[in-house]
Image (cartoon, coloured by chain):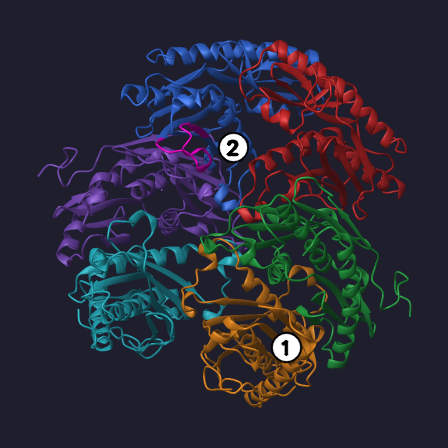
Chain colours: A cyan, B purple, C blue, D red, E green, F orange
């Protein structure tokens, strides 16, 4: 069966990575996955949050937000609503956790990596695009630290990328766009390393519970997608040794 | 190997359910899982949020919080911090999503079920205990609606319960207490129906990524636990037909 | 005349005190007065607020809140309303002031006692039950400090308890439950020591002003009630020397 | 014994009332009690809060605040602190409750009286000056409603005024200024009607508990003061019939 | 043509300056411009904000607010609205910037001057009256620092005053009152030194764009007004050398 | 004299306008002025704020914000700081006022135009670039309304653009970049129509007051710049009739 946008069920959308999209952040990556566009930046600060001070360890913190114009119906700014958006909070916790799990915080030294993922255009899969792009931005920032001698080696254990999968109209599909996501019976976000190990799984039966068989099929699709995303990252980071 | 508290790896903690723990809520359940204690209440309001008005559909909303004295180190109230706690936000979104997935909102009618999960004592697994207990509280509240003729039948499709599993010191374990949770390499929360179908999976490699084999073992343990939890729910709800 | 719940006008509701109701707080007391149930906890922190630092003095601070399910109509959380509840603010100021007036802050040393009063079920008189229970929780916490040698002697000058009184249908009554409180013409909360001295009086003519004669009668009733509450405290604290 | 500022223990400070202090409010009164200066205004709005709509009843609401420059040490604005000041909250609840107790809300009609008490200079007794002055401002505003035919008669049952009393250095005193208030062992605010009936008593043993004998002496002093305040109000309101 | 209140187009409203209007602030000035009344106070604090610490420099910070009763329709307090008022923010930034531009922060030493402008009555031109009055209050406060030997000389470079001008019904006018301001096609606030140099211009075509010729005419009027305001300031500050 | 980036004093930076930069907003324009990059979007909503309802008039509202990575030092999000940024507030008020002054709100009908200006990269002049770009975005959005027949004609009176000018090292310059802006003695933002009429002037003597001669020179430069900006707008909007 052909999907909404002509893809088959095992196909990712086109991925486009633009490095140095902006000029001030140490790492600045625009990642596009079909119509989804996320600006991922990483900035280094030479201090850590209070709870880590004096331990010689570093920290990685992430924030995620959408521009008001990123969605079909204008999204009110958090500041205008007067309170944090629950979905944003959940996603930025996920991104932060993911990145911290592959960075060796001891080797990072007393530094904070501020990772910002700002969605310029949202067509489904913004959180997974954010993770995949944020990893590149973070590597770029760390690479600069190595280049200027502040670090000897990049303190990252392994590559990490993410993708969404789901069941729509009874069919398991890779990389849902917004229309598919809205209609999905089951929706899952998977974060994996370059070695096919799992860092995070978040699966939700939106419309109905799902079986272990469906789960297995979704995991297969996710692996398929992540293998390609990891390759793309590797090409973009060919100049970086780690 | 024996665990911290004498259990083996496949063993749940003692579950104790006290119904009608408080008197005003339509459903009021204190669920205890070892030292974890969560008060789950469900209250019916005869109106729905603005976005659902006039559609004849109902809504289920959940809030989750901890008392300041529920933890070893006093937890500051959100109001004193001046902002919502990210973890709370994430958990109450999970509970709400879970309950909505088993309630037939069309059959509920223009009503909101307010489900509150307040943690009186936290020794790990508060979110999964909250889900397991909240389901009972919700059923009690719906049962009252049926008894007083407001509903003909309980609009719930299936039972739902949740449990945590994890890998600690290389061993996969069921139902982690706080000490185990803090040391876990991998940590997973599973929400399932009475039929062993998955409603939500949230798995995190806290200390390291994990393999699909580990994942499968954790799923087995989770199923084992949830089967028992579902039985306990069924006993507590033996007076309720659905 | 017999009251709503069968009591005569000079009668307290049944008081039940459960110590060690939860396990982490240094003092943890569930106090029940009829259907009113308040969890009072005291936790010791080894530092003081900025304005007291370096003076060798301690501090006692109190917070008061209700669970959303504690009342007949669900009470919205402060965090969801986005601002503090005026009534809560007023009550926690009262509890803090009361406890500080009987603790010798100089002898306490540079420590803060965090007292939390969380209402699990509200049937009138929650603030006075909170004070009566909080005193026990605070004593338990201080007793632990003495037991582990951190303090030589409990730095408390005298016992303190509180009760509500009021005029309903022209009759002065002790310890109003919610139904009585809602109908009260005059409503008064009295905080007293074991020696019958006054720590705080808050009297309000809800429906009409009141005379000094009424006031005197209410004071008599309050003393009657507080004498019994102080006795109950003494029994619960028989193991504590001060 | 002579007091700090030359008064004897039974003496009020000089009271000065300036009506029409500002031009837009329906009632605008600057009340000065010694160095304490509070601007009390009353403004009429032709609607009521949602909970009263359609009942034909009115409402009185009060707000209390201090200018940053009103105190010896600059007081930070609530907006800059980012949260409401507990003391302000407590005081505005007191003022609102007091005024509502003497206004016949049924006769007021579907109107809200907004009473604002803004302290220009604070030398003790600001809340009691606020009440005494607010009553005059409220009467002025109601008088205008009568004059323009919107009300037939002023819907106020009785006059109300307030004063502070306290025990300083063992001596009971009327109307404490800031220096006395800071040193007070016992501190009490009394709100009374023109007939010597009590509307509100708030007594606190700041430094120590107090006896019933002390309480009685303080009540006597309060009555003495309030009788004079009520006279002053009557003179200021000689043009108003009620 | 004669204006609403009898003035001609080149005429300021009556200015009245009351020094020492309140007693605690180091400088306390009530400035009245027709019916507009602003209390301007300056208080000295012997420390600076974090970003200036240890540099030997001082700081001037301003806050601006209106009492709820200052306007014809009651103005809700920022705290009740739950967020800062955009107009207030803009004005207090203007006042702070203006005062900092004439104070020699290096000579001020590590001190903060807190300038508060609280509008008691608003009939147009509150921000410009605030600036003109705040300068006097600030000078008074600095004069006290000199008198008690904390400063050798007043660290102020030049006098500063402000006035509004505008085009109403096609006529350029000086010092708009509220009725004129509401009807203005063009509205401009000018801040100038005693030497006729510009510190700040804020001009807005409210109803329509305006020409350079109109702009020039408005500047002439503004200069005319500011020259008189500077004279008034000089008389009020005749005892201060700078 | 040659400037920092090789321009002469009368020269604008390169302007680049990318229309349809994102796909959901009715108008979406990326405007680049040298290294400054602002995404300006306009979205139409078919209702108006409460204060305008039922009057048949429309509204234009603007919001302005910077991405955290837009500046050399990461800019904390407003939501994390917990309060609005004063500078943002001031700028969004300016943009809204400017756009409303050229839109005929009566002809717009009961619609709100939401204009969002999000700075992706900030190198000085972000507010003026925002205005110049927002005008194009707004026109694009109105053009779509005309195309689908919702409006007969574009309800805009005239073009509007903005530019900054300033005095740096004694030299008057057009279109300051960040380095120049930081060193500017005088800083001015001018908003003008296509006919050289003034809509808004905001001039500040940052380091010192400035003379009328300097002001005139700055105005000349501003006109020079705005004429070019208006031409660029006209080219970009050649398909739009108004």
Q: Are marks 1 and 2 in contact (CB under 8 Å)?
A: no
Viewed as shown, does residue D130 lie left or right of F222? Answer: right
Q: Position of residue B74 (x, y in %)?
A: 36, 36
Please determine whether, in this image, residue C10 is positioned above or below residue F206.
Answer: above
Viewed as shown, does residue A87 lie left or right of F143? Answer: left
Co-location on one chain, circles 1 and 2: no
Q: Quadrant of residue F193?
A: bottom right
Judging depth in this view, the residue of C79 and E74 nearest the camera is: E74
Residue ID for mark 2: C72
Magenta range: C45-61
F211 inside magenta stretch: no
Mark 1 or 2, closer to the camera: 1
Judging depth in this view, the residue of F177 and A59 nearest the camera is: F177
Q: Give me the chain letter of mark 2.
A: C
Q: Position of residue E2 (x, y in %)?
A: 91, 67
The image quadrant where one finds the C terminus of chain E is bottom right
For the residue carrying disc 1, how many other residues have a C-alpha within 10 Å: few (<14), some (14-19), or many (20+)? many
Q: Position of residue B203 (x, y in %)?
A: 24, 53
Q: Is residue C189 visible?
A: no
Q: Quadrant of residue E195?
A: bottom right
> In terms of secondary structure, where does tag 2 sit?
loop
Image point (41%, 27%), residue name: C58
Q: Which label belongs to residue F133?
A: none
C46 inside magenta stretch: yes
Viewed as shown, does residue A110 lie left or right of B219? Answer: right
Q: Give me the chain letter of mark 1.
A: F
Please determine whether, in this image, residue A6 is positioned above or below residue F235.
Answer: above
Judging depth in this view, the residue of A98 and C186 nearest the camera is: A98
Q: Which label belongs to residue F191?
A: 1
> In terms of secondary structure, where does tag 1 sit?
strand
Q: Position of residue D196 (x, y in %)?
A: 76, 18
Judging depth in this view, the residue of F94 and D180 nearest the camera is: D180
């Amino acid at each position: 069966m052909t999907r909404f946008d002509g893809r088959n069920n095992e196909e990712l959308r086109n991925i486009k990575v633009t490095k140095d999209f902006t000029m001030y952040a140490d790492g600045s990556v625009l990642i596009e996955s079909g119509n989804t566009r996320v600006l991922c930046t990483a900035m280094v600060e030479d201090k850590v949050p209070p709870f880590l001070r004096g331990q010689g360890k570093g920290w990685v913190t992430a924030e995620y937000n959408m521009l008001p114009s990123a969605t079909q119906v204008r999204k009110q700014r958090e500041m205008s609503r007067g309170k944090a958006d629950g979905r944003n909070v959940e996603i930025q916790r996920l991104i932060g956790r993911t990145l911290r799990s592959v960075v060796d915080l001891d080797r990072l030294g007393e530094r904070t990596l501020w990772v910002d993922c700002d969605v310029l255009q949202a067509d489904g899969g913004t959180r997974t695009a954010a993770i995949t792009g944020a990893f590149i931005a973070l590597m770029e920032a760390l690479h600069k630290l190595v280049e200027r001698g502040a670090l000897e080696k990049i303190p990252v254990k392994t590559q990490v990328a993410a993708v969404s999968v789901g069941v729509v109209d009874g069919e398991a599909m890779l990389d849902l766009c917004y229309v598919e996501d809205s209609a999905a019976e089951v929706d899952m976000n998977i974060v994996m390393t370059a070695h096919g190990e799992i860092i995070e799984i978040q699966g939700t039966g939106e419309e109905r519970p799902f079986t272990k068989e469906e789960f297995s099929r979704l995991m297969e699709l996710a692996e398929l997608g992540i293998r390609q995303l990891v390759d793309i990252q590797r090409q973009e980071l060919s100049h970086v040794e780690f």
